[in-house]
Structure formats: structure tokens, C-alpha cells
Amino acid sequence: MSIKITEECINCGACEEECPNQAIYEGGKKWNMSEGTYLKKNFYFDQKPIKEDIYFIVSEKCTECIGFYDEPQCMIVCPVHCCVTDQMETKEKLFEKKIFLHGN
Ligand code: SF4
Ligand code: SF4
């Protein structure tokens, strides 16, 4: 699975700094695959914000913290429990994503 942020988000920002993949962005901000990863910036373009008014998670960058932590850090730190599981992805797929983003 990867994680998503629901409309209950209070924009506290606590989750953003905990994400090992820099997959979490403040509402209204552009995002890029290369930020917080080993991917080269010149191969990736800035993308439009997914949400304008609350924090959002880029699912392409969310590995459920696999390869870094035993549990999704955003779910642990969110004070209002609005980081929830979203689309189904196997552990193998999430690990492949981690390797793609960071190498071995
Ligand atoms: Fe980032 Fe981990 Fe939350 Fe995914 S589960 S958004 S990788 S902190
Ligand atoms: Fe929103 Fe929760 Fe992240 Fe705070 S920790 S910005 S409430 S998702």
C-alpha cells in the first residue's frame, strides 16, 4: 500500500520532515521525483501540486517507509490520524520502488 492524506489534515507539517522519500508536500507546492531521492533532477520536471489547501503525498514516491523504518512514519506522527492507507501495493512492489528511488 501507499499512504494518502485525508481532508482532516490540519496543515501542521509534522509529517513532511519525517518522510525518508520526501514524498510529502505542503498544499500548493510543486513536487519533483528527484527531491529527497537519488534520481537526477535534470531528468524530472516539477509537477503541479496534487492538493492546494492541505498536505499531500506523492504515491509514486511513497514506499510506506520500506527500507528505512518498520512503520509508516507519517502515520505515527500525524496528530489527527489523517494519514491512511490508500492503494494496494505488495511489499515487493514497494521495495522495488525504494530501489528505483534510492538505489541499493
Ligand atoms: Fe513518506 Fe513513509 Fe509516509 Fe510514505 S509512509 S509518505 S514514505 S513517511
Ligand atoms: Fe496534515 Fe497530519 Fe501531516 Fe499534520 S501530520 S500536515 S495533520 S497529514
Image (tube, rainbow, N blue to C red):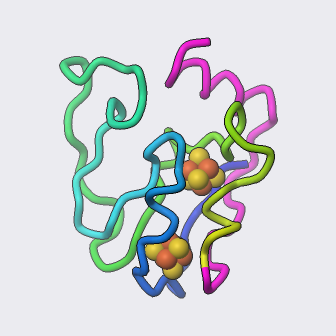
Task: Work out whether residue 50 or residue 103 is closer to the camera in this orientation and state it.
Answer: 103
Question: Which residue is at 66% across, 43% downward?
Answer: 65
Question: Which residue is at 46% across, 48% downward?
Answer: 23
Question: Which residue is at 68% across, 46% downward?
Answer: 64
Question: Which residue is at 29% across, 39% downward?
Answer: 32
- The quarter of the displayed image where residue 3 is located: bottom right
Q: Which residues are magenta?
A: 79-104
In the rendered image, residue 39, in percent from the top left (x then y), is placed at: 37, 20
In the rendered image, residue 38, in percent from the top left (x then y), is placed at: 41, 21
In the rendered image, residue 72, in percent from the top left (x then y), is placed at: 70, 54
Q: Measured along the vertical axis of the image, is residue 30 above or below residue 4?
A: above
Is residue 98 shown in magenta?
yes
Residue 1 shown left or right of residue 6 in the figure? right
Total number of numbered discs in the rendering: 0
In the rendered image, residue 5, in percent from the top left (x then y), is placed at: 54, 70
Residue 24 shown left or right of residue 65 in the figure? left
Q: Measured along the vertical axis of the image, is residue 35 above or below residue 85?
A: above
Residue 61 shown left or right of residue 76 in the figure? left
Q: Measured along the vertical axis of the image, is residue 80 above or below residue 96?
A: below
Is residue 40 shown in magenta?
no
**Residue at the extreme top:** 104
- The quarter of the displayed image where residue 81 is located: bottom right
Q: Quadrant of the C terminus?
A: top right
Task: Work out whether residue 27 or residue 36 is closer to the camera in this orientation and state it.
Answer: 36
